[in-house]
């Protein structure tokens, strides 16, 4: 019988975990034939006891290959210390090993500017706020500097996901703010130093254009062009702000809608100006230009920023979709179960994924989707995975669950796989979508 090489991918838990106890990590093997595959786990060079791991039965796929997975229990302290775990899959005489390690998320610091109306009080003071996220070190401290010197008696707290956020507030005077005194928020520990500055002159208004997503183009048959104006002080007079979108070299004016001011994390605001064109117009490679005219603001009165369709720097590659039913151990608990959808081999990276329960769309807040990740050994293809957690009774009663994927390289731009407990394996189902044609004149 012919054989197909095995491909394996890591399965990792969420980033917010307790400080003690055990967690489960895993790896997914797919694309192999014939069955079976065996797994082994190790931490660095130390073999992990096989009693701590579990291999799941293989599932046959429509293309004749098989998919399976393995999981292992490890101490959360080792995981939080970024220990290196390795999953090895053995398929006849061929071995594949993948590293399963906690992803490193860079710390992120944001300083929120003072609200201008605060300075109208008595005394004329206002508040600077500093948030530092993804700070793993529990010994990290936060402090403020004024023109490089430690300053003030700020109110500081720790919170967020597993205490990974440091927060601090500092009272400043109107005189210091108006004179462009430089304030700095600094987070320090033995292994980490973060610092971010703020003063009046650093808060410049910014303009950027945002490309339409593939999901928007496919589902609505139209492309939404977005022009985002950021770092606007709350209460700023917007009556002189003029934003317009134009199409092509002849500057054909487009119907431009200006949204309401929205809050940014740094205490300032942004506004989006949008225009909508047909998908065929966007795909025609014409240039669309956003013009921002805001007399009296501290940047040149006219700003131009353009968008245009371009072909991805890769050969179009259609995604392969695999769906895994929940583990038997989960089902035995009679609580919740998790279904996993793996999407791989696609390019470009712009893609969308939705789950359906008995043919009805599942709210996006009820499942997790990873970002597209470059595949190992490939310079141009990506993979992602999604996990849907459902009530065990829904699974046991025979409800169907579908992973639907949209991508420009697919025939009709979409495909989907469906699984239920009765069949115990995924199946390909014909796609029927009701596209949104509200207020649309695109055909």
Image: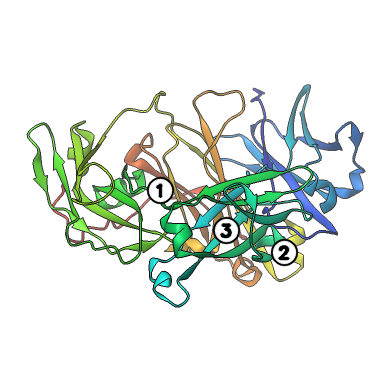
Q: Is residue 314 visible?
A: yes
Asked if residue 337 lies left or right of residue 416, the reply is: right
Quadrant where the N terminus is found in the figure:
top right
Where does residue 175 sit, x and y in percent of width and height?
45, 61
Residue tagged 1: 201
Instruction: Give the image quarter of residue 160.
Output: bottom right
Whether residue 297 sits left or right of residue 335 in the image: it is left
For this orientation, the residue located farthest to the bottom is 122
Q: Which residue is mark 2?
A: 331
Out of 375 and 262, give the one closest to the viewer.
Answer: 262
Q: How many numbered dots are placed on residues in this image?
A: 3
Closer to the observer: label 2 or label 1? Answer: 1
Residue neighbourhood size for the residue with mark 2, other residues' Cα within 10 Å, grouped as few (<14), some (14–19), many (≥20): some
- Tell me how far mark 2 sits from mark 3, CA to CA: 44 Å
Circles 2 and 1, Cβ within 8 Å, touching? The answer is: no
Q: Which residue is more in the foreground, 216 or 289?
A: 289
Q: Which residue is mark 3?
A: 130
The residue depicted at 35 percent of the width and 45 percent of the height is 213
> Which residue: 34% across, 54% down?
432
Q: Earlier in the sequence, mark 1 or mark 3?
A: 3
| Quadrant of residue 141 within the rendered picture | bottom right
State which tag comes first along the sequence, 2 or 3.
Answer: 3
Image spot of residue 125 (x, y percent): 48, 69
């Amino acid at each position: 019988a012919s054989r197909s090489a095995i491909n394996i991918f890591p399965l990792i838990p969420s980033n917010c975990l307790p400080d003690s106890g055990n967690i489960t990590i895993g790896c997914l093997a797919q694309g192999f034939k014939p069955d079976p595959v065996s797994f082994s786990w190790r931490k660095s060079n130390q073999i992990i006891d096989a009693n701590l791991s579990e291999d799941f039965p293989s599932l046959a796929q429509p293309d004749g290959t098989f998919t399976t997975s393995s999981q292992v229990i490890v101490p959360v302290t080792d995981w939080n210390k970024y220990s290196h775990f390795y999953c090895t899959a053995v398929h006849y005489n061929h071995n594949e090993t993948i590293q399963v390690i906690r992803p490193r998320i860079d710390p992120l610091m944001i300083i929120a500017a003072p609200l201008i109306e605060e300075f109208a009080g008595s005394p004329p003071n206002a508040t600077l706020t500093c948030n530092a996220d993804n700070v793993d070190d529990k010994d990290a401290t936060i402090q403020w500097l004024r023109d490089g010197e430690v300053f003030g008696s700020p109110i500081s707290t720790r919170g967020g996901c597993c205490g990974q956020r440091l927060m601090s507030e500092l009272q400043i005077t109107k005189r210091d703010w108006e004179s462009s005194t430089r304030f700095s928020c600094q987070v320090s520990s033995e292994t980490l130093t973060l610092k971010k500055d703020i003063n009046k002159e650093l808060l410049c208004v910014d303009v950027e254009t945002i490309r339409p997503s593939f999901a928007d183009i496919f589902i609505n048959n139209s492309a939404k062009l977005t022009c985002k104006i950021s770092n606007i002080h709350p209460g700023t007079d917007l009556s002189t702000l003029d934003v317009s979108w134009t199409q092509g070299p002849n500057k054909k004016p487009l119907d431009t809608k200006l949204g309401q001011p929205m809050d940014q994390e740094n205490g300032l605001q942004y506004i989006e100006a949008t225009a909508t064109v047909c998908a065929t117009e966007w795909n025609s490679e014409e240039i669309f230009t956003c013009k921002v005219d805001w007399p009296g603001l501290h940047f040149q009165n006219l700003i131009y920023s353009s968008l245009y369709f371009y072909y991805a720097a890769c050969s179009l590659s259609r995604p392969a979709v695999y769906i895994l039913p929940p583990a038997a151990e989960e089902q035995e608990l009679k609580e919740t179960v998790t279904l996993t959808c793996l999407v791989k081999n696609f390019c470009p990276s712009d893609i969308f994924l939705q789950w359906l329960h008995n043919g009805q769309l599942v709210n996006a807040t009820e499942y997790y989707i990873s970002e597209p990740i470059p595949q190992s050994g490939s310079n141009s293809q990506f993979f992602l995975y999604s996990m849907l957690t459902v009530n065990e009774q829904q699974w046991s009663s025979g409800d169907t669950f579908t992973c639907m994927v949209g991508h420009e390289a697919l025939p009709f731009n979409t495909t989907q796989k469906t699984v239920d407990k009765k069949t115990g394996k995924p199946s390909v189902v014909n796609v029927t979508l009701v596209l949104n044609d509200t207020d649309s004149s695109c055909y």
